[in-house]
Amino acid sequence: MIVTLVHIPLQNPMTLRQATDAFLASAPHYQEMAGLIRKYYTLSEDGLFVNGVYLWHNREGANRCFDETWRTMIENKYQTSPTVTYLDCPVVVDNLKGEILAP
């Protein structure tokens, strides 16, 4: 499994309500996305950056998502460049399902 951390600095602080509305508007795009297991949207406490935390079955799924079209969309939406960090994820503890996942 692969985790990607997407970090997007904001020009102006975003409120939790603004972030929630923006995230809910984009969330359907990620449903049924090939290779994506889970996505978390986050907002910093000061509202100055948003993050996406994605759990993928493999790197190929992540690479399909974070292409130039996606980068351009993020840059246009937030007027800034995102950073994407890829991390191997050998084990996940899921307390909601009572499972420990490993590839």
Image: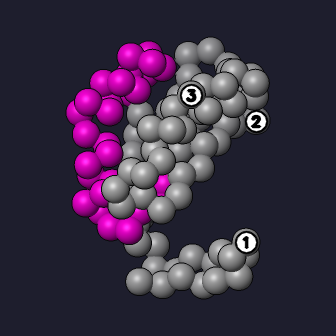
Q: Upstream in the sequence, badge 2 or badge 1?
A: 2
Residue 94: give x, y in percent of width and height: 66, 75
Q: Which residue in the protein does label 1 denote?
A: 96
Residue 26: give x, y in percent of width and height: 51, 32
Give the amino acid type for the residue marked by disc 3 in the picture: Ala
Query: What is the tally of numbered marks visible in this picture?
Result: 3
Q: Quadrant of the N terminus?
A: bottom left
**Magenta-span inclusion, residue 62:** yes
Mark toward the viewer: 2 or 1: 1
Magenta region's main secondary structure?
Answer: helix
Identify which residue is drawn at 42% across, 52% down: 32
As displayed, is residue 67 above or below residue 76?
Answer: below
Helix, strand or loop at label 2? It is: loop
Indicate left or right for 7 with 40 as reference: left
Q: Upstream in the sequence, badge 2 or badge 3?
A: 3
- Near-viewer residue (25 or 6): 25
Residue 50: give x, y in percent of width and height: 59, 34
Which residues, given as a range, are shown in magenta? 54-81
Name which quarter of the figure residue 86 lies in.
bottom left
Task: Examine the rendering and report whether any part of residue 5 can be seen.
Answer: no
Identify which residue is drawn at 62% across, 33% down: 24
Q: Residues within 10 Å of mark 1 (few under 14, many from 20)?
A: few
Q: Which residue in the protein does label 3 denote?
A: 25
Give the amino acid type for the residue marked by disc 2 in the picture: Glu
Q: Which mark is residue 45?
A: 2
